[in-house]
Image (cartoon, rainbow, N blue to C red):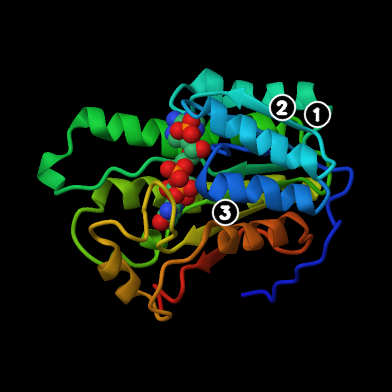
């Protein structure tokens, strides 16, 4: 694990796309990257107003921002968000594959349609965006993907589909690191533990059990995940690596 620094302004002149940037970890990441100096595009599906709030907050930091409606479940839209971001910001240096869905439940209750839906967003969408980004990223480009602590340790039943989908991103990340390394482009994956967002509220019905699974005994914040993503956006000699931001969930 690398030591993290919180230097400011390391990303001046860079442009980033954060998928699912209207709320939660994605919104915190968009703001964190902007604070480091990057212009930022965010995607959303339903959260038009929330995405507009993120754009305003980024602009208030003196950076350019754009919100793009792009459903990661649609392969063409997932790839199209990348070209739209390049068009709006003039370049793309950092892709953060954050958009994801969680569908938990006993394995026998999960249908083929559920599998298709979760893999479309969590895996195919990430592949299509990364594939499109590979055509635009310059030397020094970054692909940072959001996985889950459940790729390291599944603490209980109900996680088959979600853990399976996110585990695919570990393979994608390592393969991208190998494929794009020669161009000076890095690919890394961040594995959040329980993080207080709409997806997994810290006062939700399963929250106390999740907090108890961590060494620190608490949920993390979206800002705490964004800190590590921002660090990786500025790190030149880190690639193909997995970073747990999980409060010790995997310890
Ligand atoms: N929270 C946790 O405990 C936790 C733990 C481990 C991993 N993660 C991962 O972290 C990532 C972000 O999670 P979060 O907790 O921040 O979730 P969240 O608060 O529910 O936010 C999800 C974001 O993704 C967007 N989104 C959802 N489906 C999308 C789609 N099909 N296409 C494009 N955007 C889509 C949402 O946009 P709208 O506003 O338009 O709906 C929203 O901006 C996910 O990949 C999740 O699996 C979360």
Q: Upstream in the sequence, badge 3 or badge 2?
A: 2
Q: Upstream in the sequence, badge 3 or badge 1?
A: 1
Q: Residue tagged by mark 2? A: 85
Asked whether mark 1 and ligand 1 are closer than 8 Å, the reply comes as: no
Callout 1 touching callout 2 (CB < 8 Å): yes
Question: Gap between marks 1 and 2, in whole Å?
Answer: 6 Å
Q: Is residue 224 left or right of residue 168?
A: right
Front of the two marks 3 and 1:
1
> Going 55% across and 34% down the picture, which residue do you hit?
50
Looking at the image, is 37 positioned above or below residue 227?
above
**Image position, residue 36 (x, y; %):** 80, 54
**Callout 2: 10 Å neighbours few (<14), some, many (20+)?**
many
> Going 31% across and 76% down the picture, which residue do you hit?
212
> Going 38% across and 40% down the picture, which residue do you hit?
101
Q: Which mark is residue 89?
A: 1
**Image position, residue 72 (x, y; %):** 49, 29
Callout 3 touching callout 2 (CB < 8 Å): no
Q: Residue tagged by mark 3? A: 174
**Image position, residue 135 (x, y; %):** 73, 30
| Res. 39 image quadrant | top right
Front of the two marks 3 and 2:
2
**Image position, residue 184 (x, y; %):** 80, 50
Q: Is residue 248 left or right of residue 59?
A: left
């Amino acid at each position: 694990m690398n030591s993290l620094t919180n230097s400011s302004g390391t990303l001046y002149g860079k442009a980033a796309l954060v998928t699912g940037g209207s709320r939660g970890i994605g919104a915190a990441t968009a703001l964190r990257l902007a604070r480091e100096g990057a212009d930022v595009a965010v995607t959303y599906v339903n959260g038009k107003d929330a995405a507009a709030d993120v754009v305003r907050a980024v602009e208030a930091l003196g950076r350019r921002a754009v919100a793009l409606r792009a459903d990661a479940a649609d392969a063409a839209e997932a790839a199209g968000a990348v070209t739209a971001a390049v068009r709006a910001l003039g370049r793309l240096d950092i892709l953060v594959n954050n958009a994801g869905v969680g569908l938990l439940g006993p394995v026998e209750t999960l249908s083929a349609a559920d599998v298709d839906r979760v893999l479309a967003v969590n895996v195919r969408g990430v592949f299509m965006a990364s594939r499109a980004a590979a055509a635009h990223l310059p030397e020094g480009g970054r692909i940072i993907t959001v996985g889950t602590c459940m790729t390291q340790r599944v603490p209980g039943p109900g996680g088959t589909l979600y853990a399976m989908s996110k585990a695919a991103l570990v393979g994608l990340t390592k393969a991208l690191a190998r494929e794009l390394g020669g161009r000076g482009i890095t690919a890394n994956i961040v594995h959040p533990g329980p993080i207080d967002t709409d997806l997994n509220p810290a006062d939700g019905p399963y929250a106390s059990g999740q907090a108890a699974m961590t060494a620190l005994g608490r949920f993390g914040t979206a800002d705490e995940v964004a800190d590590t993503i921002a660090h990786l956006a500025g790190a030149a000699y880190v690639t193909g690596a997995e970073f747990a931001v999980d409060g010790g969930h995997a310890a």
